[in-house]
Amino acid sequence: MALALGFRKLATAATRGETSRALRDAPLTAAFGMMVIVIYLIVAILAPLIAPFPEREIVGTQFQPWTAEHWLGTDALGRDLFSRMVYGTRNTVGIAFATTALAFLIGSVLGLLAATVGGWLDQGMSRLVDVLMAIPSLIFALLLLTIFGTSIMTLILVIAVIDSTRVFRLARAVSEGVVVMDYIEAARLRGERLPYLITREILPNVTAPLVAEFGLRFCFVFLSISALSFLGLGIQPPTADWGSMVRENATLITFGDITPLLPAGAIALLTVAVNFVVDWQLYRASGLKE
């Protein structure tokens, strides 16, 4: 709580106008979430400067204990675990963000298009999405990755396509409440084209729920990629990834070593932090007052 309070004061002093007022009124949970996200971003950007050893370099014997030289010990190949944790921040979070952004680009564009055009296009897209959503997402991802391979680009495309179905449903649902408004009909009568209707009339009125969903969807994508890496079909070695680090070092738990729990804790901490910020944004967007 003290860290969150200090971060809120610092962020309020560093900003101006509406942003400063919003940060000043933010609850401590949201301030804590933003602080954690900022720390993760700094670690991801400055990973080569923070990590004492390269990501893939073998620097000792296997499963060395925690020492002053190797803060978290070494893994089964003798690589420094602290350095791999640091680089894992860049790899895991960066790939999850890119996947979420692509999923939102696909899902929101198609959802807005289906709601605006309607008719057979809306029905065809909706039924296809229903079919894809009927398949458990993890099993579907495992099947596609087994068929198409486990490269990073394939992983991003597969997870993005699967998660875009959820984004499509939300974008279509919120847009259908806007396309029936009088100002949309007036724009149609003025002869405005489809791109104008979507970008200038509909999108500004559905941005708030989509932004909130982006944060939630990032958490799901983040956890999905980590789960796939734990199962061996996500980010492949020797690239550092938190999910695969849990799998590779799980043997240490039987000897009372908590090192494999640290990447799992990093995953959980970021998930909780993003949810805190999303809850605050949903509260602000709803217009509710205590």
Image (cartoon, grey):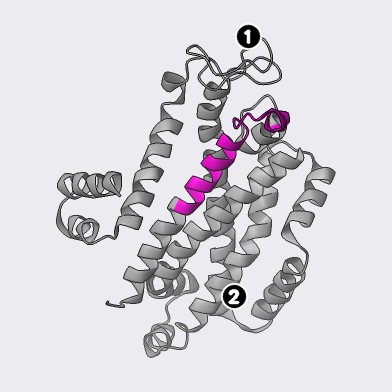
Q: Can you give x and y, in whole percent of width and height, for residue 214 in the image?
A: 49, 59
Q: Is residue 147 above or below residue 64?
A: below
Circle 2 is placed at which residue position? 114
Q: Quadrant of the C terminus?
A: bottom left
Tag 1: amino acid = Gly
Circle 1 is placed at which residue position? 60
Q: Residue at x 71, y 44 (%)?
A: 228
Determine the CA span between mark 2 and mark 1: 57 Å
Q: Which element carries disc 2, helix, strand or loop? A: helix
Mark 1 Cα shell of 10 Å, populated few (<14), some (14-19), many (≥20): some
Q: Which element carries disc 1, helix, strand or loop? A: loop
Quadrant position of residue 115: bottom right
Part of the protein shown in magenta: 250-272
Tag 2: amino acid = Ala
Q: Is residue 146 magenta?
A: no
Q: Can you give x and y, in whole percent of width and height, for residue 112 in the image?
A: 53, 72
Q: Is residue 265 magenta?
A: yes
CB within 8 Å, label 2 to label 1: no
Query: Which is more N-terminal, label 1 or label 2?
Result: 1
Magenta stretch, main secondary structure class:
helix
**Residue 186 seen:** yes
